[in-house]
C-alpha cells in the first residue's frame, strides 16, 4: 500500500503505519478490535498504540474499564515531521478520506508532554486562521509553557504577530501573565481560580493540566465552544482591567 510505505519512510515503524491506517478505517476501536483487523498480537498492538499516542497521532477515551482509541487528525503529521512535508502532503488526501469522525458526538483528543503541547499550540493558531474566531483563555499556563519549552514558546508568540492574532485572557490576582502585544488581560478575584487552564479556539476547547507531565484534553464541539465563549464574555464584563 502506497500510504503505508510513505508513512514508514516518514519515520513510523511498519507496525505503527499499519495500526494508524487501520484505526483511520475503524474510526475508533479497542486494542483487541484493531489487532483483529491488522492480524497483530494484542500485546504488540497495545505497545504500538502507546507509541502513536506519544507521537500525537492517536488519542483515547475511557468507557468503563475499556480504553477506546481514536485516530487524531492526519494533519498532525505535518507538525510532527516537518522535514518530510512534501511526501506527507502527497498522502494527506488519501488519509483524510478515511478520517470521518462521528458527527453526533464531540471529538476528544488527549496530548501529553512537550511534543503534545507544541501540537496544541500550533493547532490553536491554525484554528484561528481558518475560523477567524478570537482565541480566549480562562486561566493561563503561559509561564509554565515558557519554562518547559522557551524557544518554541517565543516562536509561537512571533507567529501570533505574523498572523495578527489577538487573544484575551482571564486570570486571577495571584497569576503573573506574560506581557505581549497580542494579548489583552483582565483580572478576576481568587474565588474564580481553576485548577486547570481552559483555552477556546475555533470549535475546540482544550483543558491544560500540568502535573508530572503536561496533559492536554482537546474537545471539538461547536456547541461546547460557543457555551464556553458565552461564559467567558460574562466573566470578562465583571473582571478588572
Image: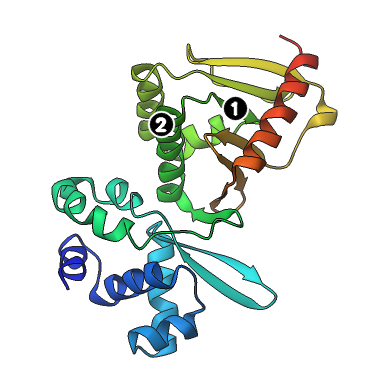
Residue 168 visible in the picture: yes
**In-front residue for pair 81/39:** 39
User: Label 2 vs label 1: CA separation?
Assistant: 16 Å
Q: Quadrant of the rendered structure where residue 160 is?
A: top left
Instruction: Give residue 181's position: percent from left, percent from top.
Output: 48, 11
Instruction: Give residue 207's position: percent from left, percent from top.
Output: 62, 44
Instruction: Give residue 50's position: percent from left, percent from top.
Output: 44, 70
Q: Tell me, for residue 200, which label it has, or none.
A: none
Q: Look at 68% across and 23% down and name the residue there.
A: 170
Q: How is the image coloured?
A: rainbow
> Of all residues shown, which one is farthest toward the top?
241
**In-front residue for pair 175/106:** 106
Residue 176 visible in the picture: no
Q: Quadrant of the rendered structure where residue 57 is?
A: bottom left
Point out the tag, 2 or 1, that comes first from the N-terminus: 2
Q: Is residue 50 left or right of residue 39?
A: right
Task: Label 2, secondary structure: give it.
Answer: helix
Q: How many marks?
A: 2
- Circle 1 crowding by C-alpha within 10 Å: few under 14, some 14–19, many from 20: many
Instruction: Give residue 125's position: percent from left, percent from top.
Output: 42, 31
Q: Tell me, for residue 130, which label it has, or none.
A: 2
Q: The C terminus lies in which quarter of the figure? A: top right
Q: Quadrant of the rendered structure where residue 134 is?
A: top right
Q: Is residue 144 left or right of residue 6?
A: right
Identify residue for label 1. Answer: 136
Q: Is residue 87 left or right of residue 37?
A: left
Q: Is residue 92 left or right of residue 145?
A: left
Amino acid at each position: 500500500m502506497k500510504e503505508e510505505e510513505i508513512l514508514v519512510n516518514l519515520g513510523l515503524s511498519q507496525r505503527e503505519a499499519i495500526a494508524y491506517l487501520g484505526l483511520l478505517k475503524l474510526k475508533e476501536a479497542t486494542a483487541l478490535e484493531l489487532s483483529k483487523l491488522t492480524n497483530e498480537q494484542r500485546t504488540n498492538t497495545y505497545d504500538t498504540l502507546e507509541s502513536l499516542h506519544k507521537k500525537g497521532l492517536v488519542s483515547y477515551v475511557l468507557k468503563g474499564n475499556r480504553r477506546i482509541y481514536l485516530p487524531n487528525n492526519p494533519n498532525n503529521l505535518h507538525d510532527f515531521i516537518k522535514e518530510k512535508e512534501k511526501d506527507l502532503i502527497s498522502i494527506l488526501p488519501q488519509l483524510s478520506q478515511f478520517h470521518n469522525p462521528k458527527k453526533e458526538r464531540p471529538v476528544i483528543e488527549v496530548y501529553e508532554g512537550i511534543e503534545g503541547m507544541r501540537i496544541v499550540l500550533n493547532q490553536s493558531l491554525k484554528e484561528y486562521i481558518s475560523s477567524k474566531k478570537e482565541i480566549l483563555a480562562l486561566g493561563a499556563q503561559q509561564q509554565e509553557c515558557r519554562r518547559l519549552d522557551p524557544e518554541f514558546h517565543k516562536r509561537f508568540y512571533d507567529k501570533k504577530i505574523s498572523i495578527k492574532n489577538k487573544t484575551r485572557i482571564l486570570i486571577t490576582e495571584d497569576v503573573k501573565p506574560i506581557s505581549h502585544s497580542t494579548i489583552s488581560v483582565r483580572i478576576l478575584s481568587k474565588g474564580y481560580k481553576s485548577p486547570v487552564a481552559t483555552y477556546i479556539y475555533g470549535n475546540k476547547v482544550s483543558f491544560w493540566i500540568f502535573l508530572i507531565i503536561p496533559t492536554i484534553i482537546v474537545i471539538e464541539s461547536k456547541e461546547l465552544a460557543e457555551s464556553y465563549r458565552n461564559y467567558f464574555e460574562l466573566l470578562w464584563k465583571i473582571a478588572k482591567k
